[in-house]
Image (tube, grey):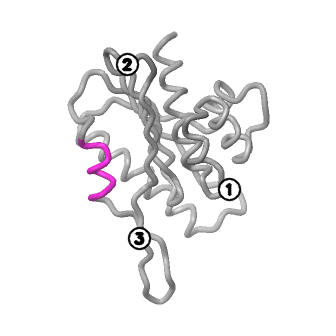
Amino acid sequence: MIYIGIDPGLSGAVGVIDEGAGNALPKLFVYDTPTALVEGETTKRKYLGRAMALLLKPFADRSDVLAVLENVHAMPKQGVSSSFNFGEGKGRWEGILDAYAIPYESVSPQRWKKAIMADQGKEKSAARFKAMSLFPELADYFKLVKHDGRAESLLMAEYGRRLRRK
């Protein structure tokens, strides 16, 4: 089985746990969400839709894949622009998953964090620590504060793996 976790934010990432046949240990991959800085009235980070689609293309139409997409929503005191970006990212990932016929679960942050991080805090730094603990071979991918999206994406993939095993 292959499990994909997607943190849909502009600073998000895609985490993959591949339990491919014959692997003694699962193969782990983490990819930052493809974005670019676009200059205009203000400089903004924008999603690169085609590059996002290319990340998931190898998993298209496979029966051994489950993706977990974080079900993000606007939060109190969050700006209109950042709320819109969150929604845009989630919508883009949903479209790509649907187009490639990749089955997925849309899961709230509270739900997957409760299952994966039950023994600790739920903040982003705790997610980085948990990812380092579960996946020490990738600890360098999570060492900076800005790498929380990487950590959370791989933890969501792990959530999918545990969900499937139940």
Q: First in sequence, mark 2 or 1: give its number.
A: 2
Callout in the foreground (2, 1): 2
Q: First in sequence, mark 3 or 2: give its number.
A: 2
Side of 15 where 113 appears, left or right: right
For image coordinates 43% across by 39% down, the residue present is 29
Residue 156 pos. (x, y %)? 53, 34
Which residue appears farthest toward the bottom when viewing the image? 41
- Dot 2 crowding, Cα within 10 Å, few <14, some 14–19, many 20+: few
The Cα–Cα distance between marks 2 and 1, rounded to whole angstroms, is 31 Å
Q: Give the residue type that dot 2 points to.
A: Asn
For image coordinates 73% across by 41% down, the residue present is 126
Residue receiving disc 1: 145
The Cα–Cα distance between marks 1 and 3, rounded to whole angstroms, is 20 Å
Circle on res. 36: 3
Secondary structure, mark 3, is strand
Residue 92 pos. (x, y %)? 36, 53
Q: Nearer the viewer, residue 20 or 13?
A: 20
Secondary structure, mark 2, is loop
Which residue appears farthest toward the left when viewing the image? 61
- Dot 3 crowding, Cα within 10 Å, few <14, some 14–19, many 20+: few
**Residue 104 lies in what quarter of the image?**
top left
Residue receiving disc 2: 23
Q: Give the residue type that dot 1 points to.
A: Val
